[in-house]
Amino acid sequence: MRLTKFGHACVRIEHGDTTVVIDPGLFTEEDALHGADAVLITHEHFDHFAEDRLRAAVAEDPGLRIWTNRAVAEQLEGIGSRVTVVGEGDAFDLGGLSVSVHGEWHAVIHPDIPRVRNTGFLLDGRLFHPGDALTLPPHPVETLLLPIAGPWTKVSELIDYVREAGPRRALAIHEAVLSELGQQVHGRLLGTGGPGTGAEFAQLAAGEGVDL
């Protein structure tokens, strides 16, 4: 399984003949969807879900399919046959790649800001994308995609989250709101310069990939 990092919260997963893209939002390169067989959307915020780009990709590729929660699906009216609604506890298969669904809500930004639905995806039992939440995978995974910066994140909570989730490796996502120096600071605290999480920590540049 090959993972390629795209901008912000987006990753591309290649497994055999199947290519899956997760969370291609407005902070993501426009070519992120090229060649994809399936798209997984964790929630409706614009940095994870770019409706116009997704509609254009569906129009261009009749084989492209989307899995997401009901709130996102309702915004894709007109292409309903291409969208599958999933929620906590669901599982499905993408060309031999197993996917299970975990979590229900976006992390709290502020009590006065309504929460939206958030869907985490576990791929092949070993790669977990939590979206914008600190949802625990059902078991320790090989690779955890860790959202390191946003209006709802706090480094101390991220450290504790990785410790509790127990992955072998944590890969940074959701970093576009940080400056280059800010990314270095977060990387140090979440990596060898911090108190320790029990996991290897890495930050991939856009376009950089890793074999899982």
Image: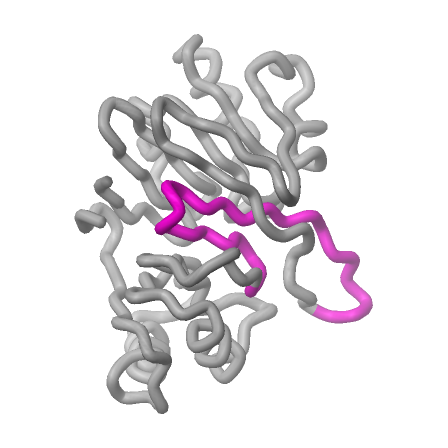
Task: Tell which of 180 and 116 is nearer to you.
Answer: 116
Q: Does 78 sit above or below residue 197? A: above
Residue 145 x/y as whole percent? 39, 58
Q: Is residue 106 magenta?
A: no
Q: Residue at x 33, y 79 (%)?
A: 198
Residue 167 x/y as whole percent? 36, 65
Do we see residue 209 in this rendering? no
Residue 174 as seen in the image, left or right of residue 19: right
Residue 136, picture quadrant: bottom right
Q: Which residue occupies the extreme right position in the image?
A: 112
- Residue segment shown in magenta: 110-134
Do we see residue 50 in this rendering? yes
Q: Does 61 sit above or below residue 8? A: above
Residue 175, picture quadrant: bottom left
Q: Does 94 sit above or below residue 111? A: above
Q: Residue at x 60, y 37 (%)?
A: 90
Q: Residue at x 46, y 37 (%)?
A: 99
Residue 184 x/y as whole percent? 28, 77
